Image (tube, rainbow, N blue to C red):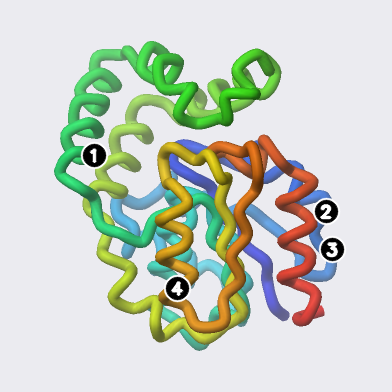
Amino acid sequence: MTQLVFLPGLAADAVMWRHQLSAMPAHLNPQVTDVHNRHASLPEMAAALLREQAGPLILCGASMGGMLAMEVVRQAPRRIQALALLGTNARPETEAMRALRTAAIELFAQGRAEEVLRANLPLAFHPSRADDQALLQSYLEFVLRAGAEQLIRQNRAVMERPDARLHLGAVSCPTLVMCGDSDQLTPPECSREIAALIQGSELVLLPQCGHMLTMERPAEVNAALLAWLAPLL
């Protein structure tokens, strides 16, 4: 039986997918993987997911989860029935981002995770969400819940991610690429590049939306996901 698996972003959990889990077709038994919490690199995470999930898979990954989804389809292209890549980046780490992550990792190790995360909140959401305290607090809570060790390990995994662009041209399953039009962490140009590499893929840009699109624009995300899934049902 085909399984729909959601892949969270860095230091995220099922909370970031709560609006989607309840909206997806029940017979696909939608679930959220936690392999990112249990392994040190994207290739290791992908191999674990493939071991733990039998049969054909439908993957929906956001941010780091999208990077992981691209690695899964590289490792087992025939098992992936459909692919959704939300607010993600197929490129390898830049030296500038590597330096920023390295500095953040040092602060996480010093117990200053909340300080770092609060300072970077404006990068995660559209400016119109600046006063939405419930939304911002929900995000902060699940990232802080992950803890410093996971923040350090997952940032290192992202820093060492492979160049997914090298294999995206071979992806042949139905693919949805979606991004907030104001995403500062994985700008729309990253999604446009992914969509251009995957033949027949669909690109959706959500207006007035930042990086955390599953939480910022759940209705629009759900509509796009259901339309993507419709031919498979």
Q: Secondary structure at mark 3?
A: helix
Q: Is residue 191 above or below residue 159?
A: below
Q: Quadrant of the N terminus?
A: bottom right
Which sits in the foreground, 147 or 187?
A: 187
| Amino acid under disc 3 | Ala
Q: Which residue is mark 3?
A: 26
- Residue 48 seen anywhere in this rendered image of the structure: no
| x and y, in percent, of residue 139 in the image | 58, 27
Q: Earlier in the sequence, mark 4 or mark 2?
A: 2
- In the image, residue 104 sits, relative to residue 156, either above or below, namely above
Mark 2 or mark 1: name the one nearer the start of the chain.
2
Res 117 seen here: yes
Q: Residue at x 78, y 81 (%)?
A: 231
Q: Which residue is mark 2?
A: 23
Name the mark nearer the viewer: 1 or 3: 1
Local secondary structure at mark 2: loop
- If you read the primary sequence from the N terminus, does the residue marked by circle 4 or circle 1 appear first? 1
Contact, mark 2 vs mark 3 (Cβ under 8 Å) = no
Query: Judging from the image, what secondary structure is the residue with disc 1 in?
Result: helix
Q: Is the C-beta separation of discs 1 and 3 under 8 Å?
A: no
- Tag on residue 196? 4
Residue 165, x across and y down, in percent: 32, 70
Left or right: 66 in relation to 167: right
Residue 222 percent location from the top left of the image: 76, 53
Identity, as a three-letter code, of the amino acid under mark 1: Met
- Residue annotated with mark 1: 97
Q: Residues within 10 Å of mark 1 (few under 14, many from 20)?
A: few
CA separation in Å, label 4 and label 1: 24 Å
